[in-house]
Image (cartoon, grey):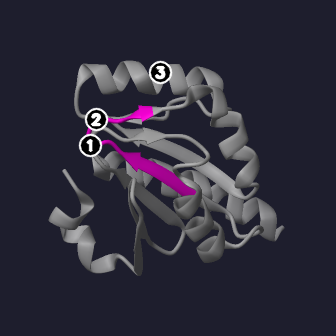
Amino acid sequence: MSIDNTELASQIIKQTKSDVGVVHFFNHIAVMEFEEGKHIDLTSSRPILNSIIDYFGDTKPFGLIANRVNSYSVSVLEIKDFRQELPNLSAYGIICYNQAGKMNAKIESSICEWSDICFDNLYDGLDTVYNRVKKRLQISSN
């Protein structure tokens, strides 16, 4: 379910759209929803990465959620490069709506530094990612 179709839509602070999808910004979380059939790599996602960097800067801890409402491919070999582009990324999650999405999330999880990144619904994903960011915010303020 797209975040636009939930009661959370009223809490979205900013949205940016590019050729590959849209990013919904909250205080400490960005939710990405990519378009059907797109291939996500550093080149195609540059506008989205730039909007995330513009919004959160390079020091404010934040979380990122891929809400997989559509089917698309990700260049898994570039996941570490994505991570280097976002040094203050504190938590990551993937919302999966089918078995294929869960299998892809497991592959991504094996490459990125976080475990337990796959969630069955948007609310669980947002809650978990936000709590992980909150822990990072507490650590960085001490």
Q: In the image, which residues are magenta?
A: 63-73
Lower position in the chain sequence, tag 2 or tag 1: 1
Above or below: residue 81 compared with residue 107:
below
Label 3 vs label 1, nearer the camera: 1
Quote the CA–CA distance across marks 2 and 1.
5 Å
Above or below: residue 16 compared with residue 122:
below
* Farthest residue, direction right: 142
Label 1 Cα neighbours within 10 Å, binned few <14 / some 14-19 / many ≥20: some
Residue at the image point whose x is 50% and y is 58% from the top: 130
**For residue 71: magenta?**
yes
Residue at the image point whose x is 23% and y is 34% from the top: 97
| Residue type at numbered disc 1 | Glu
Could you tell whether 136 is left or right of 122 in the image? right
Residue at the image point whose x is 84% and y is 67% from the top: 142
Q: Nearer the viewer, residue 69 or 120?
A: 69
Mark 1 = which residue?
Answer: 36
Label 2 vs label 3, nearer the camera: 2
| Residue type at numbered disc 3 | Lys
Mark 2 = which residue?
Answer: 71
Q: Are marks 2 and 1 in contact (CB under 8 Å)?
A: yes
Quote the CA–CA distance across marks 2 and 3.
16 Å
Mark 3 = which residue?
Answer: 106
Label 2 Cα neighbours within 10 Å, binned few <14 / some 14-19 / many ≥20: few
Label 3 Cα neighbours within 10 Å, binned few <14 / some 14-19 / many ≥20: some
Above or below: residue 13 compared with residue 50:
below
